[in-house]
Image (cartoon, grey):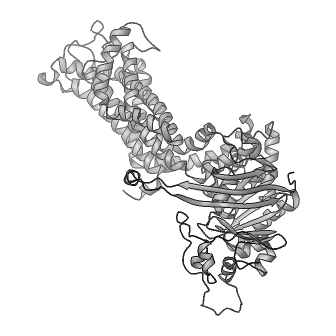
Amino acid sequence: MTENIVQYSPRGRARAIKGFLRQFLSHGGAQVGLVCLVFFLIVATMPNMLVGPLQTAINATGDFLVPPSGQHLLGTDEVGRDVLNLVVHGARISLTIALLATVISLVVGTTVGMTSGYFGGWVDTWLMRITDFFFVMPSFVLALVITPVVLEVMGRGGDILGFRPSLFVIIVVIGMTSWSFVARIVRSQTLSLKERTFIDRARVVGSSNFGIMVRHILPNLVPQIAANGALVVAGAIYIETSLSFLGLGDPLQPSWGTLLSLAQRAGAASAGAWWYLGAPGVCALTVSLSFVLIGNALDDTFNPRRRAIP
Amino acid sequence: MRDTADILRLENLQVHFPIQGGLFDRVLGRPSGAVRAVDGIDLTIGRGEIVALVGESGSGKTTVGRVITKLAQPTGGNLLFDGRDMSSERGASPLRPYRRRVQMIFQDAYQALNPRHTVFDIVAEPLRSLRLVENDAQLTERVSEALTGAGLNPPGDFFARFPHELSGGQRQRVVIAGALAVKPELIVADEPVSMLDVSIRAQILQVLVDLRDKHNMALLFITHDLPLAWLIADRIAVLYLGKLVEIGSADDITYNPRHPYTVALLNATPQIGGDADRGKLPALQGEVPSAARVPKGCRFHPRCPLAFDRCRQEEPPANEVGPRHMSACWLAK
């Protein structure tokens, strides 16, 4: 039924989106963040075309721990694999884990936060106690505990949606431990939105609670969700890198954290192999930073009151 | 036997908001009071009649409007719509038939419109959620019709606009169009023009009066402005601290007020070129008392220039002072 009705909206909506983009793109932080991010996204989407298939100890092309040279732009690791090859393949794993974990975290956080704030009363009390539980739980410790247990139960073989179980578990663990932050922000915003007159009007014109949440509250939460979502991605990359560094990653699908872990174990730091530690480290740092920059730029663009503050 | 001439009848309607005492109060067993926002009012609105509900801020007039539109739940009394008691109905789907017949116009048109919806979506919302249309063609037709009825011409130009792209008057027209789209039998208008420029007010009021004339819609016009009420309404009800002090025809209230509060309100109205000395403003003494501590006896007595002993002790009943003219004052007989 909505097909035909929506046809009137795009004109107005397109104009609003265009204005928003113009403002967003004029933000210095957003430009830097977007350029970095687009670069890494391109790299992550076609690793095989850029550097060939993922190298293993069997098809390694170089000597052991060779410094960067024309043949190996980022040197090689302790079994002779090209570090550039590993880092490019790692981008795909790292970004996918971070983005999927963020999707889980945003969906759960928004649903819980909006339900809690909108209905109030005992619904609010109980949902917020659960949220508090996850909020005070050091996500890192929880992840450390859950990951090996699940791996033990499910085993390390097979794959789910193209991911090996260990990666999938990391995705779920990061998602489940980072949603409470989103839920709190969404709840507080919902509390203020539901007192607005247009919610009263929606009720008078016969909208149901579900309709009010989906059509009136959710669209007004998009700025907060988008801005904080970018920060959640940055956090997810950090947690993923840390977990993998501690050995919870999957060596057959190495992310940047896994590479750091391998470098650490191979004694890259003491051997002076800076490229081996540096390449994945700088990548993780750059991607996190660009998400933070984009998040801040989104926040500034959506919130005119913050724009005055440099 | 039910009176079919009245579309809405309020019988001893009460809205008391409990005051939650602190832990300390509860331990000491102090009685927790209540804010008596609406404290027993009787009012009828006939089909196609315009009734103005006049009162100062804090008198409970907005709460009455919210009860009628089912945004607030009454704590006592009856809300009879077309002879049916609606006071305990709640929830979106049970109220759907009621909402098809009773709509509301809000005071602050900017706040009442979702900033992320287009005008089309705003006006279409009641038609969709109250299931009043079967297909898109019908929807577009009803939306156009409503926008035209609210004075937005040509309607197609406004479909894709957002509220922030409209002027204050246009926004209020969109709110009116939203209520109008349903073709209700009763509209509650809560201070519909108080946020607008004086030059726009007359146009908006004309739209409301036209609605009554064309579609025989009843209108409850909530305002603090007595001259405005006289201009638009058939009957005026004056509300003070949650209770009606005087009800009568617009002319009776304006030219033959029988309650000291109504007189005070009329005196507080500045008149251009009037007899009153310029710069000297007649004013009611004091503030409206808190609805949590309603004075004993007549609730107006602390501010009443004519108050005597009986007023401080006993609450006056609604006295019939003329045909369809009621005043709650010991002096009105």
Between residue A31 and residue B134, name the one nearer to us. Answer: B134
Image location (x, y in percent) of residue A153: 36, 9
Residue displayed at 80% across by 67% down: B206
Disc tally is: 0
Q: Is residue B307 above or below residue A2?
A: below
- Residue B315 appears anywhere in the view: yes
Q: Residue furthest left?
A: A270
Q: Is residue A52 above or below residue A119?
A: above
Q: Is residue B158 above or below residue B128?
A: below
Q: On the rendered image, what quadrant is the N terminus of chain A found in?
A: top right
Q: Is residue B317 left or right of residue A128?
A: right
Q: Is residue B224 left or right of residue A157?
A: right
Q: On the rendered image, what quadrant is the C terminus of chain A found in?
A: bottom left
- Residue B107 appears anywhere in the view: no
Quadrant in the picture for residue A47: top left
Image location (x, y in percent) of residue A145: 29, 20
Between residue A193 and residue B225, name the one nearer to us. Answer: B225
Q: Is residue A279 above or below residue B205?
A: above
Q: Is residue A11 left or right of residue A132?
A: right
Residue displayed at 58% across by 66% down: B58
